[in-house]
Amino acid sequence: MFTLANAIKGKKVKVIKLLNSEISSKLLEMGLYDGQEVEVLFKAPFGDPIAVNIGGYVLSLRLDEAKLVEVK
C-alpha cells in the first residue's frame, strides 16, 4: 500500500481513500478526500512532519497521520 507518508517530495499524487481511524474525519475536513490532488512540498530531516499542498494551501501532517492517506 502506497501512502502519503511514502510520497516523494515534489511529486503530485491523488488520494484514493482514507484508512479508518479516529482522526480520519479530521483529515477529510482538511481537504484529504478521494480524488484530491496533493503535492508533497517538504519533509523534515527525520521525515516527520511533512508539508503538503492541497488545493492551494499548505497542510502540515505527522507521519502517523500521513500513513492513513492511501494515494496513487
Image: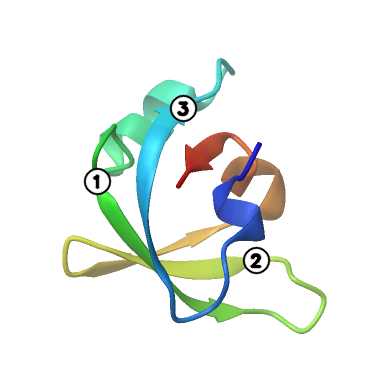
**SS for tag 3?**
strand
- The percent position of residue 46, horizontal first and vertical second, equals 82, 76
In which quarter of the view is residue 50 placed? bottom right
- What colour scheme does the image use? rainbow
**Above or below, comparing residue 2 to residue 1 in the picture:** below
Q: Which residue is mark 3?
A: 18
* Residue type marked 3: Leu
Q: Which residue is mark 1?
A: 36
In which quarter of the view is residue 5 placed? bottom right
At horizontal 66% and vertical 58% (from top left) the residue drawn is 6
Q: Which residue is mark 2?
A: 49
Q: Assess whether mark 2 and mark 1 are in contact (beta carbons under 8 angstroms).
A: no
Task: For label 3, count other residues whose C-alpha is less than 10 Å away and answer few (under 14), some (14-19) or many (20+).
Answer: many
**SS for tag 1?**
loop
Label located before the other in sequence (3 or 2):
3
* Residue type marked 1: Gln
In which quarter of the view is residue 3 placed? top right
- The percent position of residue 54, horizontal first and vertical second, equals 27, 60
67 or 29, which lies in front?
67
**Eye-nearest disc, 3 or 2:** 3
**Eye-nearest disc, 1 or 2:** 1
* Residue type marked 2: Pro
**SS for tag 2?**
loop
